[in-house]
Amino acid sequence: MSAELDALINIVVTGKIKEAKEATNKCLAAGHTAFEIVFDGLAKAMDIVGDKYEKKEYFLPQVLLSANTLYQSLDIVLPMLKDSAEGDVDRGTIVIGVVEGDVHDIGKNICKALLSGTGMTVIDMGKDVPIKDFLAKAKEVNADIIAESTLMTPTLDGMKQMEKMLKEEGLKGKIKTMIGGGATSKEFAEQIGADAWTYDAVECSRVAAEIIKNR
């Protein structure tokens, strides 16, 4: 591990947004590839952030700050990664968003950051997203996973509808589904036939990585 990569990791972990791009460029100047920066640097940084969040050493503001710092670096290296031979490795595609009727997206944004740190292609649909739009986008990008979240019980029916639509189109099992958010539970996921339920963003990134590994 070089001093430049160590510095970038520390900048992401501590959420020093204004220093991220310069630190990323220093890593490139030192000879690190985009692949190394993403997987040896940014992914490790978000692992640290995830651990701190899990241990309650970090809370939502710190995680969001680290996430925004991460994106500053990703803006530089992701285009390079996609153009490189190393970027040809398929690390999975996930379509993520908050279901229609709910606009609470902090948890979804943290999940997005941790998932991006793993190297997955993350398609963020935003909040208040109709179920048909989730499915249309997943089919368009050949997604491996659809991840839906909600904090509100009235919008749970949308998640149930997603499972029904996947079955009707013969895509159930081909596109895996993950659900999360305060209104959801493991029991609800089993009831509707979702492939996974995750308690928080850390578990979300781990379960998604496991799904991709076993596809």
Image: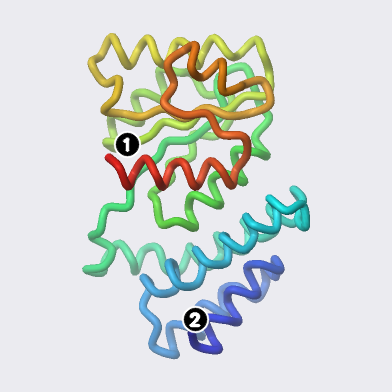
Where does the image place residue 10, in percent across and percent down from the top left?
64, 75
Q: Is residue 69 above or below residue 2?
A: above
Residue 50 in which image quadrant: bottom right
Q: How is the image coloured?
A: rainbow
- The answer to which of 56 and 136 lies nearer the viewer is 56
Per the rendering, the mark at residue 25 is 2
The residue that appears at 56% across and 17% down in the rendered structure is 187
Where does the image place residue 162, in percent across and percent down from the top left?
42, 16
Q: Residues within 10 Å of mark 2 (few under 14, many from 20)?
A: some
Q: Which quadrant does the C terminus fall into? A: top left
Q: Is residue 85 above or below residue 160?
A: below
Where does the image place residue 41, in percent across and percent down from the top left?
50, 72
The residue that appears at 57% across and 60% down in the rendered structure is 46
Position of 53 with respect to 26 (left or right) is right
Position of 202 with respect to 161 (left or right) is right
Q: Which residue is mark 1?
A: 143
Where does the image place residue 179, in percent across and percent down from the top left?
52, 27
The residue that appears at 62% across and 21% down in the rendered structure is 184
The residue that appears at 41% across and 57% down in the rendered structure is 119
Q: Is residue 198 above or below residue 132?
A: below
Residue type, mark 2 in image: Asn
